[in-house]
Image: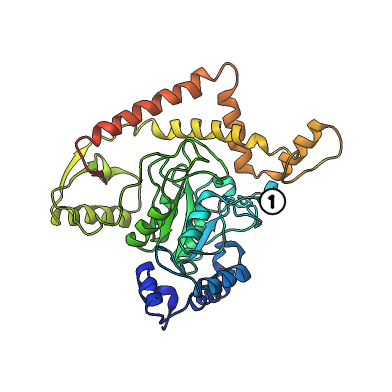
Amino acid sequence: MDDLTKLSIPELGRLYGLREIRPAEVVGAYLERIERLDRSVGAFLEIFRDGAMKRAAELEDSDRSGKPLFGVPIAIKDNICTRGRPTTASSRILEHYCPPYDATVIGLLEGAGAVIIGKANLDEFAMGSSTENSAFKITRNPWHLDYAPGGSSGGSAAAVASGMALVALGSDTGGSIRQPAGLCGVVGLKGTYGRVSRYGLIAFASSLDQIGPITRDVRDCAITMQVISGHDPCDATTIREGAPDLLTGLYAGVGGMRIAVPAGLETWSMDESVRNAIMLAIEELENAGAETETIELPGMDTSIACYYILANAEASSNLARYDGVRYGLREGTGSLIEMYEKTRGKGFGEEVKRRILLGTYVLSAGYYDAYYSKAQQVRTLIREGFETVFKHFDLIV
């Protein structure tokens, strides 16, 4: 094969089945590409060269039946725990942390035959939208190195867009899969909350966080999402009902679908080329048989404020565990309070500190009811508004 890094998951599977290629060849091709490109892109924090090649060699003598990701090289966002391998969330406070367990999604991927090739860079603790807030490096957009790849899963999106991974996992709290996928020209999916286990995901905002795939095309995305979906007894928020079959509907078309178009789309602040692409997509959907209708989206004037109150409040609570006592960075030799101050002062970056302070403020006495409690009520109203929209429409552009 001329370039093994250009094959999709089904194409790899077909060639593996014919024994025209071997997992070690494919993994080796991706590792060579990483060696060549990642100095300039900066998508990876850690490369598992020896482990990936060992895993590929083991797969060559194994049965590939029932393994939809057999021999597929996958990058993992570095806020998803990998046993015995660094998991830093791109923060100094976890710089040398190696978890004693794997996240649930890691076991599911490996059970499906995947080969994990490394950990991808992110904005520290997934707080950011450009992957410039990492404590260790800046990730660049592989299509134009002077541009940002988006964030917080910018390393994952850049790895897939540049052909350094066939699939990557990211996490999405407020756009951290979808936005970098858009900026890097790949496919990213944040599934329904509870569809994928959060066990082993380093928490940012637990009521919003979800793990999801980033791929080059929709079919690869569906295949990967099917593998990582499902109930997990280690995560009480996972959905108990079985995940839907995402593959059978891929070729059904959009004829007869009712699609909502947000009112005011033509006036939203965006690059004109982006606006033109959206309007062209709507036109293509109509030409393919979909019926479109303009509607007022619920929560357009409150959703961002609501998100920042809730996400930062939960971040303040979740990140309180990083105090230098149990794991991670420890600074200071004086009193306990001094150790807390020095550890957190040195370990957290500016964006993380800013969000902790905002979250602590909205949870504090005298402000809880005015901010956090009110934001929870607004979230309920926004959700109810979208539930009403989806009674009448199949999807929203």
- Tell me the kind of residue under disc 1: Tyr
Seen at 22% across and 34% down, the residue is: 391
* Front-lying residue, 318 or 63: 63
Judge whether residue 149 can be spotted in this image.
no
Q: Nearer the viewer, residue 293 or 119?
A: 119
**The N terminus lies in quadrant:** bottom left
Nearer to the camera, 226 or 336 = 226
Which x, y percent locates residue 276?
Answer: 26, 55
Image coords of residue 353 (percent x, y): 63, 38
On the image, which quarter does residue 5 sit in?
Answer: bottom left
Q: Quadrant of residue 269?
A: top left
In this image, 328 relative to 25: left or right?
right
Q: Is residue 103 above or below residue 62?
A: above
Does residue 235 show up? yes
Q: Residues within 10 Å of mark 1 (few under 14, many from 20)?
A: some
Q: Could you say where residue 280 lies in the image, as x and y percent from the top left? A: 22, 56
Q: Residue furthest top?
A: 366
Q: Is residue 85 left or right of residue 340?
A: left
Of 129 and 3, the residue lying toward us = 3
Asked if residue 274 is positioned above or below residue 241 in the image, the reply reads below
Per the image, the residue denoted by label 1 is 97
Looking at the rendered structure, the secondary structure element under dot 1 is loop
Q: How many discs appear?
A: 1
Q: Please name the residue shown 45% across and 61% down the image.
A: 112
